[in-house]
Structure formats: C-alpha cells, structure tokens
Image (cartoon, coloured by chain):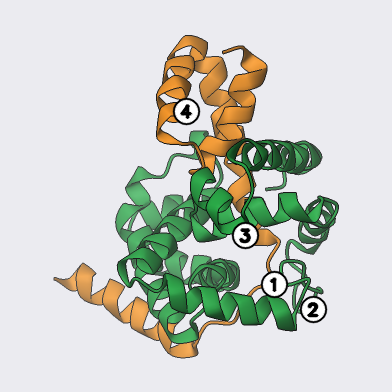
Chain colours: A green, B orange
Amino acid sequence: MKAIQAGDPDALSQLYDRYNGILKALILRVIHNEAEADDLLQEIFMEIWNQAKNFSAQKGKPLGWMVTLARRRAIDGLRKKQAYARAEERLQNEIEQQPDAWVHNATEEEIVLSDTRSLIRKVIKGLPPPQQQAIDLAFFRGMSQREIAAKTNTPLGTVKTRLELGLKKIYDGLKELRDEL
Amino acid sequence: MNFNEFQNRARLYVIGALEPEELEEFENARTKFGKKGEEFITKCYALHEAFALSLRPAKASSAIKERLMAMVKAKQQA
C-alpha cells in the first residue's frame, strides 16, 4: 500500500492480482451480474488508486479497507440501478439451486488464505440458519433490521437478536485469526 | 449503555445494520468509551474481511486489469 500511495502502478497491478478474486466474489454476491461486477471491480480498483492516501495501516489491514470500500460501492450500485427486484429473483433462483450457497467448496487455486478461508466458513456454517440469513441480508444486501424483519416476516427484536448473536459468534471465532487477516 | 452492549452494537454498526435511533445512542456511547471503543470498532471491521473471504474467489475478465492499468497510466500522464 505504501508503494501505491507513492504512485507506483506496478504495486497496484500486484494488489489487483492478489485480491481481485476476493473483491469480485463480494461484488457478485451483492449485485448478481457478471458484467456489472467486472465494471464495478475496475471502478473500485481505480478508487483504491485514487484514495490510497486515505488508507491508514493503524486502522486496519489493506484487505479490510478494500472490502469495506467494495461492499459500499456494490450496495450503492445495487440501489442506484434499482435492481433489487431483479437481484432478488436471481438470488432466489440461486438459493433454490444451491441451498448452501454461502458456503462454497475450496478449489485447488485457493492456496493463498485457504486456511483462513476454511476456518471462517466453518464458523459461519456453524451458525443456525436464521442467524446466517439475517447476517447475509444485512451484509451482502445492505438491508436494515426493519427491512430484514419485513422480508423474513420476523419480529424486529428477533432479527436484532439473531444479528447480535451471529456476529458475536463469528467475531469470537475470528479472534485467533485476527493477526492473519 | 455498558461496554458489553456497546460491543454488540459495534458489530452491527460496522455492517451498517444499526437503526437510526440506535445509531444516535451508539454515537453517544462511542464518545463515552473513547479510545477503548474506537479500538473495538476497528477490530470489528475484521468481520468485513471474514465475510469476503468466506466466498469462493471469482475470476475477473482479463480485459479489466488492462483497462484499469491503462486508466492509471493515462491519469499519471495527464
């Protein structure tokens, strides 16, 4: 990140090679459209380049900063294009075809960060499905507690409890990994 | 709000899931807990990384990187 802050394009190229797959997966999870995800990925890396001076290592690691930025842009993009209904339909199809959609099988290419990834998946998979669903809707869809309550026909207080419990379990599960993330 | 409640709210805060009325209360508690609170919020952002890492990486079109690097170089030359 220091090299990017200094304006070195090769550093951006390396950062792209290392993290484009993770960021694209996140964007795809939000907007469910391959071409739009590619366009947004390019915009996000351009923003990373332009905003690199705002990154502070004291506030976290580069991946966290990039994921926060990518998620915000993806959710903004989803809202701007008023694609909720379309994405909803696609998401529903995806869920029907792949019930365990959030938890994927690792591939051989996933060497980098694979231990971290498998442990995170294990933690998430260990959550009760209603907690997984609430977190999924909040994080990947940008929904508020009230929106989740309405979508799932669940009392607001229950949604809040599911989110709090689920996030705490994941957070606690990450404690040992924090230095690696 | 005690620190335990603050921690619960902080985890919701970092994923943008606090309701407006909770947000105001949380910001007040954030001021109250100061540095300790800020450090905890920073740690909570690891949740973002975790959720991203829980997904199988997706391959981007090869043209994307070429376009990106061309834009960066053009900007540098401008």
Identify the secondary structure beneath mark 1.
loop
Q: Is residue B22 above or below residue A121?
A: above
Nearest to N terminus: mark 1 or mark 4 = 4
A55 left or right of A101? left
Dot label at residue B22: 4
Classed neighbour count for the residue bearing mark 4: other residues with Cα under 10 Å, few (<14), some (14–19), many (≥20)? some
Q: Nearer the viewer, mark 1 or mark 4?
A: 4
Total label count?
4
Instruction: Determine which residue is flagged by label 2.
Output: A107
Residue A68 position, x and y percent, is 48, 51
Q: Amino acid at mark 4?
A: Glu
Instruction: Determine which residue is flagged by label 3.
Output: B52
Identify the secondary structure beneath mark 4.
helix
Q: Is residue A152 above or below residue A12?
A: above
Contact check, label 2 and label 4, Cβ < 8 Å: no
Q: How many angstroms separate mark 2 from mark 4 (CA)?
A: 41 Å
Residue B36 position, x and y percent, is 57, 16
Dot label at residue B56: 1
Q: Amino acid at mark 2?
A: Thr
Q: How many angstroms separate mark 2 from mark 3 (CA)?
A: 16 Å
